[in-house]
Image: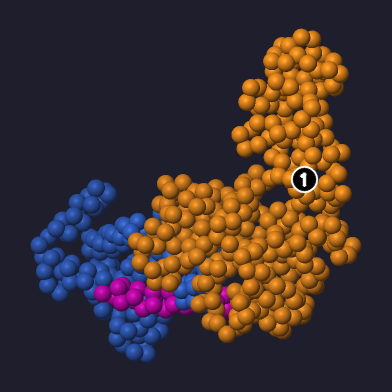
Amino acid sequence: MITFEGVTKRYPDGTVALDDVTLECPTGRITVFVGTSGGGKTTALRTINRMVDPTGGRVLIDGGDVRDRRPAELRRGIGYVIQHAGLFPHRTIEDNIATVPYLLGRRKKDARAAARELMERVGLEPGMAKRYPYQLSGGQQQRVGVARALAADPPVMLMDEPFSAVDPVVRAELQDELLRLQAELRKTIVFVTHDIDEAIRLGDRIAVFRTGGKLVQVAAPEELLADPADDFVAGFIGQNRGIRSLSFAGTSKLRLRDDVVRPVTSSDTEGLDWVLVVDEKRRPLGWARGADVDGSLADAALAPVGPTFRPGTDSVRVALDAAVLSASGLAVGVDGDGSVVGVAGGTDLLEGPR
Amino acid sequence: MTVWNQIELTWAWLTASAQWHGEDGIPHRLLEHLYYSGVSLLFAALIGLTLGALVGHTGRGGFLAVSVANIARAIPTFGLILLIVVIDYSIVPVLVALVALAVPPILVNTYEGVRGVDPDARDAARGMGMTGWGVLWRAEIPIALPLILLGLRTSAIQVVATATIAAYPGFGGLGRYIIDGLARKDYQLVVGGTFLVVALAVLVQLAFAALRRLVISPGLARAS
Ligand SMILES: Nc1ncnc2c1ncn2[C@@H]1O[C@H](COP(=O)(O)OP(=O)(O)OP(=O)(O)O)[C@@H](O)[C@H]1O
Ligand SMILES: [Mg+2]
């Protein structure tokens, strides 16, 4: 666990970057720092590996004051990822990744073998090991940055806006990758971003900073959405707070309907507006409008199924999205094999969370 | 006298067996020349690299160092030599003048190279647990190497060309031929000496091109 005890940082020019911040970042969890630009997020992050020394208060890792450790030695035990990756242009990808193992005096051969393993873990082609950073895209460089931070298997990782310089598609990929890695590795991660959606997606806990280095609220993402501490936090979360909070509502207790599901061999639409046509394995083929069906469903014109959701796995937000995009207004729930479990309409979906 | 004529005469001079023996022979003069150039360059490199790297790494005193170096470039080397020769008649003033000539390009390039390292790379190096020296050795210097070599090459060529003035106060080197030739109105000698100096400068250039290939990371190819 990382503990901030009344941490203050006042720069010689009088700027107060952190103002009496008290906070805990639990072990094995992702704590996200968000807030306005200049709110002290980076400063707070950098007090953990002593890139910044506070002018007041203490920062503890597992109960030990970081100031009792020599900075270089402390930092070798803490992963560090920054916005533009900051790779070394003169080193190959594998040697970039092996930076900390080299510093720790590991043998070159072992360090490189470990680097190649890590490349696979973060989704990089092994063929890239001998390339140089300029030969990689921004997203790939960022993956190298993450691999480099993981190389010595540190229990703590500090990540300062690591994904903010890549396009939204790549960013989403990198976020997924991080969550997948984290499910395996269970590191104590402190993650800085100014993107509230990213914070909600990644954070187990979110700490909101405000100009002047004040910590305004620390809460789990669902709590932050449901109950922002003040107008500043509410404003920072922005519009659609309600819709967003549905990301945290589960669909396991949802009552699914089965009455509109029909096999393709059937011709029975008995006064239904829409029927969901399925094949013999109950995989969805499309929506048929009841009034238009004349004879077998096999000959009927079908509207596309659109996105589906996995009941019990996906959130209400995903299901609601599927419902809105569905021709019938009903979201199609499928199991792992893609077979239809049942369907749910907008009102069914909103019953649970309320 | 046609150019072709001149080339023939120079060739005759260069290949005459008398030129390849004794105190005034080409091998001896060449060695003197190389010795003065090498020693000056060595000292200049020690001073320029150390100061440039330290100032670039700490970021302190950069403006001062670069200004002083640039002003030093304006000092006429010839005048400097005459001035010091009056004080102490030995080869030392000549070497001091050559060092003074060679330090500025090395210092300025090393400083600019180290200073110009991507701040993110520097921050990452520190954040991963490199000490100050570690950051300098493992990141800043290798990344600055293309510029550092450029500075060394500029200085080396200048020193090789300028070391001819060692002959003026009578310390030999390839300049001997030029000065003697001028005094005796023996232009064959002047052209021959000049040719040797230029050839040496070309060799220095080639040596640096080879060195570049050996020591500069392919990862920096695009940046330089
Ligand atoms: N070395 C410094 N000297 C003086 N003031 C500084 C220094 N470093 C940061 N600051 C100031 O401290 C405050 C907090 O900066 P910090 O970088 O922690 O903000 P941030 O929340 O990370 O912002 P951003 O989202 O823009 O990255 C800012 O007002 C900044 O100008
Ligand atoms: Mg920041």
The residue depicted at 50 percent of the width and 52 percent of the height is: A121
Q: Position of residue A250 (x, y in %)?
A: 75, 48
Dot 1 amino acid type: Lys
The residue depicted at 77 percent of the width and 67 percent of the height is: A218
Q: Which residues are magenta?
A: B35-61
The residue depicted at 77 percent of the width and 19 percent of the height is: A288
Of residues A63 and B48, the one drawn nearer to the viewer in this rendering: A63
For residue A28, which quarter of the picture? bottom right
Q: Is residue B191 visible?
A: no
Q: Mark 1 = which residue?
A: A253
Is residue B54 inside the magenta stretch?
yes
The residue depicted at 26 percent of the width and 71 percent of the height is: B34
Q: Position of residue B65 (x, y in %)?
A: 53, 77
Extreme top residue here? Answer: A295
Q: Is residue A226 visible?
A: yes
Q: In the picture, which chain is orange? A: A
Q: In the picture, which chain is blue? A: B
Q: Position of residue B117 (x, y in %)?
A: 53, 64
